[in-house]
Structure formats: C-alpha cells, structure tokens
Amino acid sequence: SQKIEQNSEALNIQEGKTATLTCNYTNYSPAYLQWYRQDPGRGPVFLLLIRENEKEKRKERLKVTFDTTLKQSLFHITASQPADSATYLCAPLNAGNMLTFGGGTRLMVKP
Amino acid sequence: ETGVTQSPTHLIKTRGQQVTLRCSSQSGHNTVSWYQQALGQGPQFIFQYYREEENGRGNFPPRFSGLQFPNYSSELNVNALELDDSALYLCASSLSGGSGELFFGEGSRLTVL
C-alpha cells in the first residue's frame, strides 16, 4: 500500500541554522509533491510544489528537492527564524490523483 | 477575494448522533476536498467533490457522506458518530486544472463523547 513517512520526532534547531526535513514515500510515483505549513489549531498553508521532472525548487529561504529514484523529498529552510516554528507536512499526489499527507514534522527554532 | 470558511468551529456530540459540517469555497474554486486530522497526525483524505459529484474517496466508511452545491459550497455529514471520529475536520478548495494547490479553512473541531 502507498505510504508517506515523515520524521515524527520534533526537530529542534538554533536560529540562523538550516533546517532539513525529510519525506519518504513508497509504492507509487507521484506526478508532483507539495509542502505545507501548519500552525497549532489552524489549517495547513501551501508553501511549494515540485514536479517529478524537477530536481529542485526554491522560494525565498525555502528549498525543496525531489528524488524520484530514492522516492524522497527534502525540505530546507535556510537562516531559520523562531517564526518558522510549525509543523511541516509533505503531500504527494497519490495514484488516484488525490493529495495525501504525511504525518508531519514539528520544527522548533530556538532564539 | 474571500478565503475558505468552515462552520461550526467547535462542536460536541455524543456517540451515535449525526453531525453536519459546512464549508464555503474560496471564490472561483470549483473543487472541494475534506480531510480528517486526529491530534498529532497528518490530515487523512476523506473525499473530494467536483461539479456536485464525488470525484474520489479515501478509506472512510459510508457513514461519512458529502454534498457539493451549485455555488461550490459543501457539506460533510457523519452518521452514527463514534468516539474515534473526534478530530479536526478540514475543508480545502482548489481549482480543477490549476496547480493543485489546496486552500484550507481553519477547520471544525469535533469532540464525540
């Protein structure tokens, strides 16, 4: 069955460092993958989309990579700030062309 | 441009009851998706509606049903509530043929006692 895995343990980093979050998926090949940010008690907010023919996508301090051979996407936040503290969700498009979400990774950036 | 709005924001029901949650899409969006998010977990896909018809469904029993109206607003109905139905229910709108980006509402927090 299709599976999406994100590190369920919180990632704690110091302000100014680069945060790297991992998303692994199995048993399918998504046409694209999206990343969302979710703050406590709020709905997810779209950040970036990367297609299967793109290796890397950037937006301001955010960078996403997509390795279809490894079946993995990495999400980087450079020069992290306490305001970046949130849960980050990866969402590959599934075989039924519906967006499915991983469990999310909580990022804590300490001043 | 108005965003996605959901109602009610919080509600409490008892086991066996029925609940209806409502969602107004972002202006111009013709597709609505519903997700269930248990505490500490990622959103789980329930179903999607496009042009008033169910367009895809996740692994949820038939007691989860929905509607989409001509103005693209939507309802999620859950019958015979169980304790495990306690969750945040998220509605997301999108534009068919668009980039696939989902615009989420703030959710309806359902507690089943």
Image (cartoon, coloured by chain):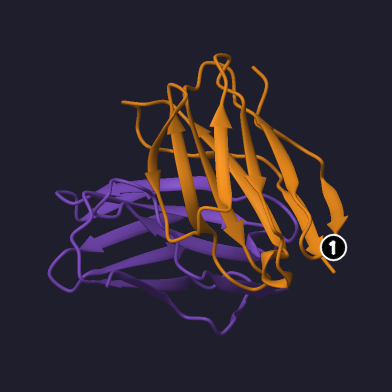
Q: Is residue B53 above or below residue A45?
A: above
Taking the spot 53% from the left edge, 63% from the top edge, the residue there is A88
Q: Is residue A64 above or below residue A21?
A: above
Q: Residue at x 21, y 49 (%)?
A: A31
Across and down, in percent, residue A103 comes to 51, 71
Q: Indicate the quadrant where residue A55 lies.
A: bottom left
Q: Residue beneath label 1, please?
A: B14
In the picture, which chain is purple? A
Question: Which residue is nearer to you in this view: B16 or A54?
Answer: B16
Query: Which subunit holds the residue at mark 1?
Result: B
Image quadrant assignment for residue B73:
top right
* Location of the C terminus of chain B (image quadrant): bottom right
Tint of chain B = orange
Helix, strand or loop status at disc 1: loop
Q: Relative to residue B21, is residue A22 depicted above or below?
A: below
Tell me where residue B54 appears, x and y as whole percent.
42, 35
